[in-house]
Amino acid sequence: MQIGLWIDEFRPLPEVVEAIEKAAAAGFARAWIGERGGWDPLTVLAAVGDRAPGIGLGTAVTTTVPRHPLTLAAQALTTQAAVGNRLTLGIGPSHGPLVEGRYGLPWDRPGRHVREYVDVLVPVLAGREAEVHGEALTAVGGVTAPGATPPPLLLAAHGPRMLRLAGARADGVLTTWTTPRAVGEEVVPAVTTAAAGRPAPQVVAGVVASLTADPDGTRSWVAETFAPADGLPSYRDSVRRQGLGGVADTVIAGDEGTLEAAVRAFADAGATELQLIPAGPPADRERTIAFVASLAR
């Protein structure tokens, strides 16, 4: 199992790029950027260009609903060329309250939307044309991007239907707010079974973690900072299926032994990558990154 680092994008762009360069120097396998109302993740990664050599670059995630798949394919292939074919494209439909509240767009059958979206994106990323006249979208045509190879495509997924789609139609899954047990008993079986006959899927588990002397304080910080996540149906349903009270209950917090044991547990569960999301006060986050980087090396 490899280890990647989720980069906090809420800072000036040069600092974000510098953080990616530091992640590469520390030995992380991939640097991941999300879309949370700040910088556009694909544009940030294009700005990295040929810097930070040796590290993969990924979006976790780029949202699909406000973008037509042909538009996203063009943007992704442009970024892929800019970074020397190091991109992993992670996508997801976001969440109903955010789509309706932020964009004023309808939230209707997101599973159908993602399925039709992937029906366009997969061939177009591979340099072919698509013709889809679906219930959720229409797309006809392709994108010409000489020299850009198709980036691996990962789907954000938590429920059974989306996990199966990630295995059957994409290159794997991005999942978060989860435990090693859920990865081993729910995520990996659903994705790998759906991927039968195809290359082995990637299973990237986003894990909020902190090397700290105050684990309870860290969980309280996460519960407060990420409180909106507990109100989003896909996250809420996922943590309830795991028998947990909220997203903060998935946090790994404690000493070096606690974190190392958690990393081993995710590897034993079948995750192909642990995506470290450092939490807590700045000093704890820095210690967490340094320690987990030593495990990555």
Image (cartoon, grey):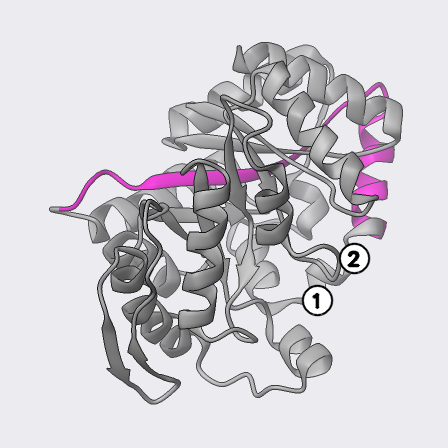
Q: Decide: few, some or many residues near mark 1? Use Cα within 10 Å; few <14, some 14-19, many ≥20.
A: few
Residue shown at 29% from the left, 60% from the top: 122
- Where is mark 2, residue-wise? 227
Give the SS element for disc 1.
Answer: helix
Task: Farthest residue to the front: give it.
Answer: 146
Residue 191 to residue 125: above or below: above
Identify the residue under disc 1.
231
The image quadrant of residue 285 is: top right
Spatial CA span between label 1 and label 2: 7 Å
What amino acid is at disc 1? Answer: Gly
Left or right of 162 in this view: 169: left
Give the x, y percent position of residue 206: 56, 40
Residue found 31% across the figure and 70% down from its top: 120
Asked whether, in this view, residue 282 is left or right of residue 25, the answer is right
Q: Is residue 200 magenta?
A: yes
Q: Which residues are magenta?
A: 198-224
User: Looking at the picture, how far across and down is residue 117, in whole percent?
Assistant: 37, 72
Q: Marks 2 and 1: in contact by CB < 8 Å?
A: yes
| Residue 88 appears in view | no
- How dense is the environment of label 2, judged by Cα within 10 Å: few (below 14), some, or many (20 and up)? some
Point out residue 258 in the picture as x, y percentages from the top left corner. Answer: 65, 17
